[in-house]
Image (cartoon, rainbow, N blue to C red):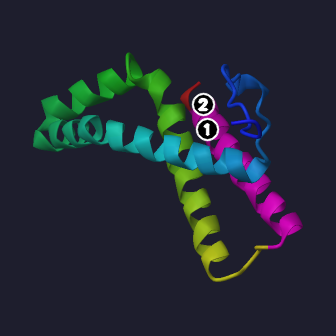
Amino acid sequence: MPNVPRRPVFLNLLRIRLPVMGVVSILHRVSGAMLFLALPVSIWLLDTSLRDADGFRQVADQLGGSLRFLLPFVVWALAHHTLAGVRVLLLDIDRGAELAAARGSALAVIAGGATAALAAAVALL
């Protein structure tokens, strides 16, 4: 087999440079997984808080303490997943599919998610 290209033996994932659209695509999947994993806890918190006044106080104490640091991450996941989903829907109908527009919308998704997470973090102070 003289002309068979050799496959890489070691692939350094830190050296691969994705375009910003690829980063947004991967983060869209990550944020969806985070939202899926947060769903049981969210349902339990809602159920407990709506049960009675003591349950509401219990949830308020937990959100004020141990779960407080997770809220900006959940807010980021929700904002990023929503914005990236709207971006994909617009791309599906050929809105913003040109390279410059696609880069701009990808950067807007990243900025929007970061802004929402920062706002949530500041609101918790």
Along the line of sight, the residue nearer the viewer: 98 or 44: 98
Crowd band around label 2 with a 10 angstrom C-alpha radius: few (<14), some (14–19), many (20+): some
Name the disc covering residue 104, or none.
none
Reading the image, the residue beneath label 1 is 117
**x, y percent for residue 98:** 83, 72
**x, y percent for residue 81:** 53, 53
Reading the image, the residue beneath label 2 is 121
**x, y percent for residue 65:** 39, 17
Q: Is residue 107 magenta?
A: yes
Crowd band around label 1 with a 10 angstrom C-alpha radius: few (<14), some (14–19), many (20+): many
- In this view, the residue farthest toward the bottom is 93
Proximity of marks 2 and 1: CB atoms separated by less than 8 Å: yes
- Magenta span covers which residues? 98-123
Picture residue at 68% right of the left edge, 41% below the top:
114
Secondary structure of the residue carrying tag 2 is: helix
Q: Is residue 88 above or below residue 82?
A: below
Secondary structure of the residue carrying tag 1 is: helix
